[in-house]
Image (spheres, rainbow, N blue to C red):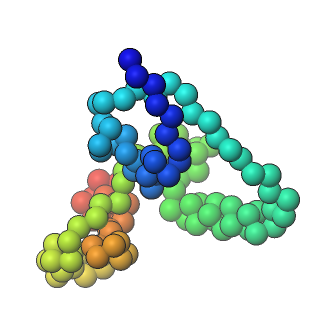
């Protein structure tokens, strides 16, 4: 068995993505990870950002103290501009974001549009 150490950039980490889901899928076994954390001294902007996120989530999600939740494992799909335009004619309210020449959709909205929430 050959051992290799990969640096952060080598892993091509992105939102729910990495080299381990593509080129190295089913080819490697991760035995350890090292995290390098930085101490934050001014937490004011971070504290406000967290408070803003909590406020948004409270408007969209049930109170976890009242209704249990396993969280979300859905990934926002990325489609071609042509596919997006076809969907947009049927669902004019469709939320989208640019994504490297393609279009990213909001998985949560797609679930709601399918009435599967």
Q: Nearer the viewer, residue 21 or 94?
A: 21
Instruction: Specify the quadrant of the image occupied by residue 115.
Output: bottom left
The extreme right residue here reads 41
Q: Nearer the viewer, residue 108 or 117?
A: 108
Residue 72 visible from this viewpoint = no
The quadrant of the image that shows the C terminus is bottom left
Question: Is residue 94 rendered to the left or right of residue 12?
Answer: left
The vertical placement of 7 against 98, above or below, is above
Residue 13 visible from this viewpoint = yes
Instruction: Specify the quadrant of the image occupied by residue 32.
Output: top right
Question: Residue 25 at x, y = what percent?
Answer: 30, 36
Question: Residue 114 at x, y = what percent?
Answer: 24, 60
Question: Residue 89 at x, y = what percent?
Answer: 17, 82
Q: Nearer the viewer, residue 49 or 64?
A: 49
Q: Residue at x 58, y 45 (%)?
A: 64
The vertical placement of 50 against 23, above or below, is below
The quadrant of the image that shows the N terminus is top left
């Amino acid at each position: 068995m050959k051992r290799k150490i990969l640096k952060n950039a080598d892993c091509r980490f992105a939102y729910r993505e990495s080299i381990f889901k593509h080129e190295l899928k089913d080819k490697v076994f991760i035995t350890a990870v090292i995290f390098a954390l930085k101490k934050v001294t001014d937490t004011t902007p971070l504290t406000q950002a967290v408070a803003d996120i909590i406020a948004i989530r409270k408007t969209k999600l049930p109170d976890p103290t009242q209704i249990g939740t396993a969280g979300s494992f859905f990934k926002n799909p990325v489609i071609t501009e042509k596919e997006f335009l076809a969907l947009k004619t049927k669902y004019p309210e469709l939320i989208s974001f640019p994504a490297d020449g393609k279009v990213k959709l909001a998985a949560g909205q797609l679930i709601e549009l399918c009435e599967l929430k």
